[in-house]
Image (tube, grey):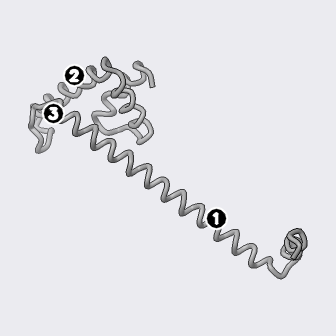
Amino acid sequence: MNCSEAEKRIQHFIDSKLTATEEAAYIEHIRNCSSCRQELMSQFTIDHVLKSMNGTAGDDISYDMRSLLNSRIIESEKWIKAEKLRKRVLYTAVALGEIAAAACVLFEMRGGFVWNLIEQLLGK
């Protein structure tokens, strides 16, 4: 991700509207780019102050912006890890289902032509 792309995603990051992949790339960028990190801090501060004034900041009325932003980044990293794990579990379940389906097909064909051909090819 470059600085121009990161700048376009600042508000989406603040509002938690990025996908896990986008958010991971964004966090990686701001960890390595001091100017984008500073811009995020500025916009995060403005956003938090405006939400506090409007009464939409929730229970968190702290003005320690650095801590709030660091907490937001840590929460985001936890969410990204959870999303990656969820996808791995889903892909594993799908793969196991496909393996089970293939095994069922092979067992069904066991007495048929294809099974005999497989046995001949394997020398059994």
* Residue at far bottom of view: 111
- Check disc 1 and report the residue beneath it: 98
Give, as a three-letter code, the residue at label 1. Glu
Nearest to the eye among marks 1 and 3: give it.
Answer: 1
Labels 1 and 2 touching (C-beta < 8 A): no
Residue shown at the point (39%, 31%) measured from the top left: 28
Name the amino acid, label 2: Ser
Query: Mark number for residue 51?
Result: 3
* Left or right of 27 on screen, residue 92: right
Q: Is residue 104 above or below residue 13?
A: below
Question: Depth check: 123 or 105 in front?
Answer: 123
- Quadrant assignment, res 97: bottom right
Q: Which mark is residue 42?
A: 2
Percent across and percent down for residue 22 are 42, 35
> Real-space Cα distance between discs 3 and 2?
14 Å
Q: Quick one: label 1, few (<14), some, or many (20+) residues within 10 Å? A: few
Whole-angstrom CA distance, mark 1 to mark 3, is: 49 Å
Q: Residue sitting at 31 percent across and 20 percent down?
A: 34
Q: Position of residue 72 (x, y in %)?
A: 25, 38
The quarter of the rendered structure image containing the N terminus is top left
Crowding at dot 3, Cα within 10 Å, few <14 / some 14-19 / many 20+, comes out as some
Q: Is residue 19 left or right of residue 75?
A: right
Residue 1 position (above or below residue 109): above
